[in-house]
Image (spheres, coloured by chain):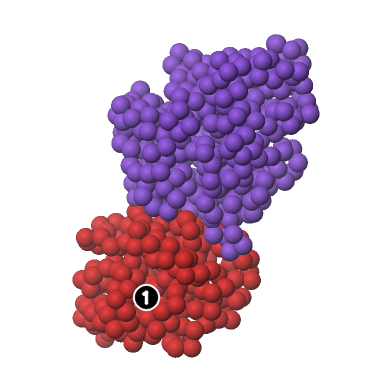
Chain colours: A red, B purple
C-alpha cells in the first residue's frame, strides 16, 4: 500500500486533528514547527505559521504538541522545522528531544543535504537537484527520500508538476529507498497520479486549509485522498 | 561540506531547489572574477556609465577639528553605491544566459539600480518591495516604473525589506531556471556575500588611494552605516589589512550586530534580531535601507574577531546629522549614511574617511 503523509501546523487543536487524519487513513503525520521567515512556503503555510506563532507555538510548545499527538496515534511522526529554530535550541538537543516526544525522524526545510550530515534526517531532493546530489541525499536520508515535485514553494497547483516523473526516474536510478512525493499535491486525483509513480504522497497546504474547518472535515478529506490512492494503486500489486 | 564561511557565519541555508543554482552562480563568479574581459567590461561601465571614480570630499564645516573625508557614493549614477553591485551582477546574469532579473529593495536604492541596469542591458526586471516601504519611498517606486521595472508590493508581515527579500527568494525559487536573483547586500547564501563584497570593494580601493593622495597617510578610522552592510564591507575591504579602525554604525532599532544573536535568515547564519527561539524579530528604523533584522555574515565575523567595531545611533541623532550636513556642506545625504555621520562626534580620531553611501532626495517626503 502506498503511504499517505499529512502535514499539519503545530497548534492547540493539532492533536485532535492529527488523530482525525490518521483515522481517515494517514500513515504519517508531518508536524510543522512555525518559523517567522520560511523561504520555501507558499501563502497557506505562511499564514498558518503566523497564526501558530501568535498562539505561542515556539519550539518547546511544539515538542509538547508532538508528545500529545504521540499519545493519540501510533503512526510515524515527523517534525518539519527550520535551521534558525535549531540554532537557538541546539541541533543535537532537538533531535534527542524530538525522539523523546515520539518523533520517528525529522525534516529541516532549509538545511540542504551535505550540511550537518551527523543530524540524521529525511533529505529533500528537487527537480533541479543534480544526479550527484540525488546520490548524496539517498546516502544520507533517514528511511525515505522526500521528492519535491516542482520548482517552487509549497501550495496547491492546478495539476501535478510535469517535472515530477523525470525526478522519480532519476531517483529510482540511484536508490531503492521509498520515494515520497510532496509540494503541489492537493486533490485526490493529484494524489492518485503521484502515487502511481512514488511510494508515498505528502499533502500539506490543502490539508492545513481543510483542517481550519475542524477534525471531521479533515477526516473526510484524508479519507478521499486515501480512497483515490488505493483505487489507483491496488494494494495487491504493490 | 559547508561552503562560504566567515568563521561560524555564512553558509547556505536554503531549500534544496536553490542549491544547484547557487553552485552554478559560484562557478560563474569564480570564472568571471579571473576573466580579464569581465573586469574590463565592468570597469568600462563603472567609468563611462556609472561615473567612477567618485570624489573624496573634505568636510571641515561639518566636522571642525577633524579631517573628515566623505567618499561620495551619493554622486554615483542613480544616487547610491548600489549601482556598483547591480552592474557587476547584471554582467554575471548575462554570462549565465538569464534574461529575467529578480530583486528585493528596501529604500528603493537597490531596486532603482537594478531597474537601471536592466534597462541598460534590455533585461526583464521584477522588484519586490514592502508595501510600507513603497509608501515611504514613493519617488523611488516611480523611478523604477519609469525605467521599465515591475514593482511588486509585498503585503505580508512587516511589509518592509525582510519580507521583500523573502518574497524575492520565493520568486527565484519558482523561476530559478530562467531568472537571476540580484541580491542587493552582502547577505544571503554563499556565494552572494562574497560577490557583493568584491563588487563594492571599489569604494574602499578608491577611497584608500584618494585619502593617501590627500593626506599622505592612511586614515585612523574608516566608518560607514550598516544595514545589510554592503557599503561598509566595500569600504572596509581595502583597509582590513591596514592599521585602520573599522567602525560600522547601525540604526538603534535594527542593531543586529550590537544586540543580535546567532540565527539563520535568508540563507545565511549571522547575527540577527531574533528571540530566544530563533524567530526573527521586526526591525524599526526611519531609514528603510537599515530597516533589516539581519546583517552580512562577514560583519558578524569582523565583530567577533574584534577587527571591526559596531555601534548604533537612533533616528533623532541621524536626522540631526542629516540636516547638519545639508546646512554645513551643501550635501543632502540619505538617512542611512546620516547614521554614520551622527556617530562622528563620538569618535576619538582626527583622520576619518566616511562612506556617504547615497543621496537624500528619496527621504524628503519622509522627513
- Which residue sits at x=76%, y=12%? B216
- The local secondary structure at tag 1 comes to strand
Q: How many marks?
A: 1
**B337 on left or right of B243:** left
Q: Is residue B359 visible?
A: yes
Residue in front for this viewpoint, B297 or A159: B297
Image height of A109 relative to A237, above or below: above
Q: Residue at x 47, y 56 (%)?
A: A37
Does B97 sit left or right of B44 as displayed? left
Q: Quadrant of residue B215?
A: top right
Residue B61 location, x and y as percent? 67, 15
Task: Measuring from the top left, give residue A110's x and y in whole percent.
Answer: 49, 58
Say if A193 sits above or below B22 in the image.
Answer: below
Q: Position of residue A32 (x, y in %)?
A: 45, 69
Nearer to the camera, A133 or A176? A133
The residue shown at (52%, 39%) is B286
The picture places residue A220, in percent across and down from the top left corner, at 25, 82
Instruction: Read off the residue under disc 1.
Output: A5
Taking the image as shown, residue A153 lies to the left or right of residue B25, namely: left
Residue A238 showing in the rendered view: no
The quarter of the picture where residue B120 lies is: top left
- Seen at 50% across and 24% down, the residue is B359
Up/down of A71 relative to B91, above or below: below
Amino acid at each position: 500500500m502506498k503511504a499517505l503523509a499529512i502535514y499539519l501546523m503545530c497548534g492547540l487543536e493539532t492533536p485532535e486533528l492529527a488523530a482525525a487524519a490518521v483515522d481517515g487513513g494517514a500513515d504519517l503525520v508531518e508536524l510543522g514547527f512555525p518559523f517567522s521567515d520560511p523561504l520555501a512556503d507558499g501563502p497557506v503555510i505562511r499564514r498558518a505559521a503566523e497564526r501558530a506563532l501568535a498562539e505561542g507555538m515556539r519550539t518547546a510548545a511544539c515538542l509538547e504538541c508532538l508528545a500529545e499527538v504521540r499519545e493519540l496515534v501510533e503512526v510515524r511522526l515527523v517534525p518539519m522545522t527550520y535551521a534558525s529554530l535549531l540554532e537557538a535550541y541546539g541541533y543535537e538537543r532537538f533531535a534527542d528531544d524530538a525522539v523523546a516526544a515520539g518523533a520517528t525522524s525529522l525534516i529541516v526545510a532549509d538545511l540542504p543535504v551535505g550540511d550537518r550530515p551527523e543530524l540524521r534526517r529525511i533529505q529533500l531532493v528537487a527537480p533541479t537537484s543534480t544526479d550527484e546530489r540525488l546520490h548524496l541525499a539517498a546516502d544520507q536520508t533517514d528511511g525515505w527520500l522526500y521528492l519535491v515535485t516542482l520548482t517552487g514553494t509549497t501550495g496547491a497547483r492546478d495539476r501535478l508538476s510535469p517535472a515530477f516523473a523525470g525526478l522519480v526516474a532519476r531517483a529510482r536510478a540511484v536508490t531503492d529507498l521509498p520515494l515520497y512525493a510532496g509540494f503541489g499535491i492537493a486533490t485526490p486525483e493529484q494524489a492518485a497520479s503521484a502515487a502511481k509513480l512514488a511510494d508515498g504522497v505528502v499533502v500539506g497546504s490543502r490539508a492545513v486549509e481543510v483542517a481550519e474547518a475542524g477534525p471531521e472535515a479533515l477526516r473526510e478529506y484524508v479519507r478521499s485522498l486515501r480512497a483515490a490512492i488505493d483505487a489507483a494503486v491496488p494494494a495487491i500489486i504493490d | 561540506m559547508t561552503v562560504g564561511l566567515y568563521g561560524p557565519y555564512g553558509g547556505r541555508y536554503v531549500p534544496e531547489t536553490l542549491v544547484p543554482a547557487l553552485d552554478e552562480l559560484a562557478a560563474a563568479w569564480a570564472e568571471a572574477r579571473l576573466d580579464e574581459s569581465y573586469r574590463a567590461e565592468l570597469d568600462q561601465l563603472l567609468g563611462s556609465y556609472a561615473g567612477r571614480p567618485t570624489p573624496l570630499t573634505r568636510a571641515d564645516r561639518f566636522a571642525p577639528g577633524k579631517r573628515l573625508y566623505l567618499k561620495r557614493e551619493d554622486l554615483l549614477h542613480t544616487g547610491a553605491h548600489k549601482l556598483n553591485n547591480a552592474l557587476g551582477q547584471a554582467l554575471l546574469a548575462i554570462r549565465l544566459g538569464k534574461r529575467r532579473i529578480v530583486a528585493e529593495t528596501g529604500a528603493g536604492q537597490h531596486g532603482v539600480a537594478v531597474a537601471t541596469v536592466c534597462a541598460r542591458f534590455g533585461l526583464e526586471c521584477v522588484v519586490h518591495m514592502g508595501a510600507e516601504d513603497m509608501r515611504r519611498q514613493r519617488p523611488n517606486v516611480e523611478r523604477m516604473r519609469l525605467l521599465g521595472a515591475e514593482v511588486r508590493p509585498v503585503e505580508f508581515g512587516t511589509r518592509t525589506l525582510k519580507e521583500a527579500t523573502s518574497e524575492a527568494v520565493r520568486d527565484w525559487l519558482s523561476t530559478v531556471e530562467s531568472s537571476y536573483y540580484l541580491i542587493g547586500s552582502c547577505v544571503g547564501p554563499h556565494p552572494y556575500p562574497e560577490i557583493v563584497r568584491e563588487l563594492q570593494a571599489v569604494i574602499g580601493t578608491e577611497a584608500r588611494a584618494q585619502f593617501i593622495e590627500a593626506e599622505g597617510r592612511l586614515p585612523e578610522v574608516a566608518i560607514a552605516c550598516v544595514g545589510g552592510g554592503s557599503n561598509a564591507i566595500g569600504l572596509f575591504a581595502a583597509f582590513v589589512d591596514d592599521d585602520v579602525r573599522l567602525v560600522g554604525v547601525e540604526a538603534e532599532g535594527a542593531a543586529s550586530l550590537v544586540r543580535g544573536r546567532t540565527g539563520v535568515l535568508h540563507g545565511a547564519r549571522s547575527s540577527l534580531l531574533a528571540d530566544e527561539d530563533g524567530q526573527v524579530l521586526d526591525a524599526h528604523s526611519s531609514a528603510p535601507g537599515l530597516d533589516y533584522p539581519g546583517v552580512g555574515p562577514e560583519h558578524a565575523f569582523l565583530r567577533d574577531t574584534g577587527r571591526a567595531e559596531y555601534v548604533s545611533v537612533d533616528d533623532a541623532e541621524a536626522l540631526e546629522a542629516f540636516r547638519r550636513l545639508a546646512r554645513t556642506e551643501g550635501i543632502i545625504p540619505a538617512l542611512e549614511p546620516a547614521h554614520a555621520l551622527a556617530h562622528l562626534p563620538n569618535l576619538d580620531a582626527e583622520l576619518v574617511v566616511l562612506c556617504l553611501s547615497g543621496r537624500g532626495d528619496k527621504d524628503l517626503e519622509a522627513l
